[in-house]
Amino acid sequence: MALEHDNWKGTTGGLPWMQRTLIRLLAVIDQRIIYGVLCLVVPFYMLFNHKGYISMYHFFREGFQESCWKAFWHVYANHFRFGQIIIDRFAAFGGRTFRFEYGEGKEAYFELARQAEGFVQLSCHMGNYELAGYSLKQEVKKMYALVFLGETETMMENRRKMFSVKGVEMVPVKPDMSHIFELNNALRDGQIASMPGDRIFGSPKSLDSVFLGHPVRLPFGPFQLALLREVPMAAIFVMKERWDTYKVYFRIMRADAGLGKKEQAQQLADAFAGEMEKIVRLYPTQWFNYYEFWTDNKKD
């Protein structure tokens, strides 16, 4: 289960030698030591990433109806958790292993994976979806995961190394949209096509839905691809529980076959938005979309 968080760009250290040093360091020391340093770094990151800070403040104030002080505290906790997510990824590059527990939906997901047909797997910018791709081997099907380029060669090299032994093939987003053909071919061959379901990229087409009581736009592409290939959709959420442990939640989503394609796409988008809301209510500080996610908050 793997997908690059595109909002990690610029937050993982822009210099390759710094990244390599961090990987070597985390190969020999407990990442909790770096977590401790992170406590002091987070306020400065919030200060210089003011736009992201404000969007998260709105997220807690409007989505969870929190007081000013509680929302401010949760913004700090969210940035701290995001830093831990990044550190865990570098720790995995250095050879550290993590434990994975399974929430509801595991049996249905693995039953789906054992079937001959492929399926579309949705991720979102919550938790640490990519880390599971480094740690959990695809036992039945191969996964083709859409990734966003722009990271350093150090990052991409480690990504390729980790994914290559886990049955995951990276499919870079391309300006000519040819990556869609690669994902389509994967589904045709009975494999898994992994795509983010909460970010609009490439094509401007979108679907309107509701998340935490506010209107949002979700990308049309993943839902359209599943309907064109007539395959199921699954959503995976990999949420940090403890310093060395993540919990994986599985959701299977199918549209009503009696509906038209447009209505089916809307049904799937609404189902995914609903599943995201359920998970974020359990893990409110693990939401990592650092912009005004709701359409009624966006400024012209």
Image: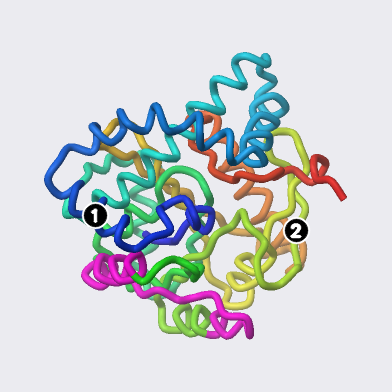
From the viewer's side, name the closer residue of 261 and 257. 261
Q: Residues within 10 Å of mark 2 (few under 14, many from 20)?
A: some
Residue 181: image location, x then y, percent: 55, 85
Reading the image, the residue beneath label 1 is 21
Q: Which residues are magenta?
A: 154-181
- The magenta stretch spans residue 169: yes
Residue 30: image location, x then y, percent: 17, 37
- Disc number placed over residue 241 in the picture, else none: none
- The quarter of the displayed image where residue 202 is located: bottom right
The residue at the far right in this view is: 300
Position of 93 with respect to 199 (left or right) is left
- Disc number placed over residue 207 in the picture, else none: 2
Is residue 26 positioned above or below 68 on the image? below
Q: Amino acid at mark 1?
A: Thr
From the viewer's side, name the closer residue of 235 and 260. 235
Q: Quadrant of the N terminus?
A: bottom left
Residue 22: image location, x then y, percent: 26, 51
Tell me which residue sits at (51%, 27%) in the image.
76
The earlier-in-sequence mark between 2 and 1 is 1
- The quarter of the displayed image where residue 197 is located: bottom right
- Under circle 2, the secondary element is strand
Q: Amino acid at mark 2?
A: Leu
Tell me which residue sits at (47%, 78%) in the image.
187
Tell me which residue sits at (65%, 24%) in the image.
64
Position of 205 with respect to 134 (left or right) is right
